[in-house]
Image: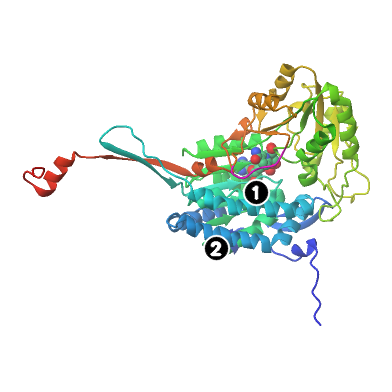
Amino acid sequence: METKMESTPESHVEGREFLMTIGGERVAAEDGRVEVTVDPSTGQPLAEVPQASAADVGRAIEAAEAAFPAWAATSIEERGECFRRFGELLVEHREELAALDALDSGNPIKAMRLDVMISLDYVKGWPPLAQALTGEVIPASPGNLHYTSSRPYGVVGRITAFNHPLMFAATRPLASLITGNTLVLKPAPQTSLSTLVLGELFDQAFPAGVVNVISGGAEPGDALVSDGRVKRIAFTGSVPTGLLIQRRAAESGWVKHLSLELGGKNAMVIFPDVDVEAAVDGAIFGMNFNVCQGQSCGSNSRVLVHRGIYDEFVQRAGEALARTRVGPAAEEASEMGPLVSAQHLERVNGFVAAGRSEGATLVTGGERPEGVPEGGFFLAPTMFADVAPEMKIAREEIFGPVMSVTPWDDYEGMIELANGVDLGLTASIWTHDLDLAHRTAERMDAGYVWVNDSTRHYFGTPFGGTKNSGIGREESVEELRSYLETRVVHTRLSDPGAALERMLGGDATSD
Ligand code: NAD
């Protein structure tokens, strides 16, 4: 009897060639350039990733441009059929995609399986939302008909960040596709593997050239941003890169439409009436320690706790975090994996050192946990208490497993603390008092506010930030509209008598 070989996470990488997808073909970089990506759990080489040159990017844009007229001419139903097929492929390849993300990014495999299923919700969600889009008839002046229609831009350039590789690649392009645009997608260089495989799945579900996937870092990213044929850029990443993209887009000499999903330094505000245990669970959950080691734009990295429950909160949160099982991302038992790269670990360790030297109280973590593989980029879940607003760890985005806790006494002082940073992505408010919750939500300078919840996204609700956290809102009707240009059509309506006279001649209106 034939025995079925059990696949291991590593079996999805071993001996495999990872290629880009351009115009329906699987291709290497034309000049053969590759970079070796590393498994952050071990520090060992994992696979070779093609490095697209500007010429490769040009070919991908050409393919997307060629596919655009036919794709734009399809109905939303036909596009929805491609989405349905794509969703089936995601489910079929769930284990493979989750394994690639765990090995490539260091995110725990259990969380990455969940990312595939969250992606499926978006695949299912977009077609009905797009079907419900309407135009307007505007009563601007009598005797005229004014209505709006809309059309896609053409080629969209989509650049993603490293922290949720598969989920970003599978979900972020969807609004542009359902509205009839074609796409060139570039993942982050640290975590490209699942996106490169996804390129093949997109191709099985969509006509060739509708989705093109290129890999590499700043060089192909800049080529995409600078090309005049790409009218719409959608970017997820850091504030400095977002600012650079704005500048480079302008320097191309073309007026481009940009959406920027950038960093966060998000406040969780806890009032003294809460169940402290629930608030501790909420803060730990909202930090995404167990999903992506706190490398999350929306995580509540600044917890502002009313002094009445402060000591209890700090003690319970410290104890809970110290129990986290940190280990290799592909192991089922691991609740938290390593950071994405040695360079990023060094950066985050720099923040830990700053927290210590500036006088914050290190409650737990701050060092490499015991028992993890030698070469891996691990940092134990870390919490600082007594963090003052002027400290570096209170002001700058860390993008790692470091949560800071600050006590507050008076309401206005707390509001000032919550809003006193340059970023405004999310905020989270914990209280049983609904008046207080909603009055406080109105005071938060952030694009997305949770009450008694954190970090969860709900498809259909606009996600995006204020201040330096970005421009635009995703995951909603607002995002759909951002991939369409509005056109107004005016028709001057003749007087019926004059029209009939023209048609029939003579005295057309007499009996
Ligand atoms: P990053 O800015 O270093 O890189 C993001 C992407 O930009 C990568 O694909 C990279 O190759 C590309 N890139 C780099 N230089 C470029 C250039 N000159 N032109 C065009 N593209 C270029 O960010 P990262 O380290 O991958 O991600 C972490 C950051 O992303 C954090 O600040 C985080 O808050 C943010 N983020 C935001 C959201 C959100 O929805 N708001 C989601 C996830 C991550």
Q: Is residue 77 above or below residue 447?
A: below
Estimate the x, y position of residue 505 in percent, counting from the top left. Answer: 8, 47
**Which residue corresponds to mark 1?**
168
Quadrant of res 454: top right
What amino acid is at disc 1?
A: Phe
- Magenta residues span 454-460
Residue at which label 2 appears = 24
Note whether 138 is above or below 311 in the view shown: below
- Residue 219 left/right relative to 177: right
State the residue lying farthest toward the front: 511
Any part of residue 20 in sight = no
Distance Cα–Cα, label 1 vs label 2: 21 Å
Residue 319 is drawn in which quadrant?
top right
Does dot 2 land on a helix, a strand or a loop? loop
- Please state, as top left, top right, bottom left or bottom right, where the C terminus lies in the image: top left
Q: Helix, strand or loop at disc 1?
A: helix
Taking 433 as reference, is 358 left or right? Answer: right
Q: Quadrant of ligand 1?
A: top right
Residue drawn where x is 78% and y is 53% of the image: 110
Do labels 1 and 2 touch, CB within 8 Å?
no
89 and 510: which one is in front?
510
Expressed as whole percent of the image width and height from the top left, the position of residue 410 reads 76, 16
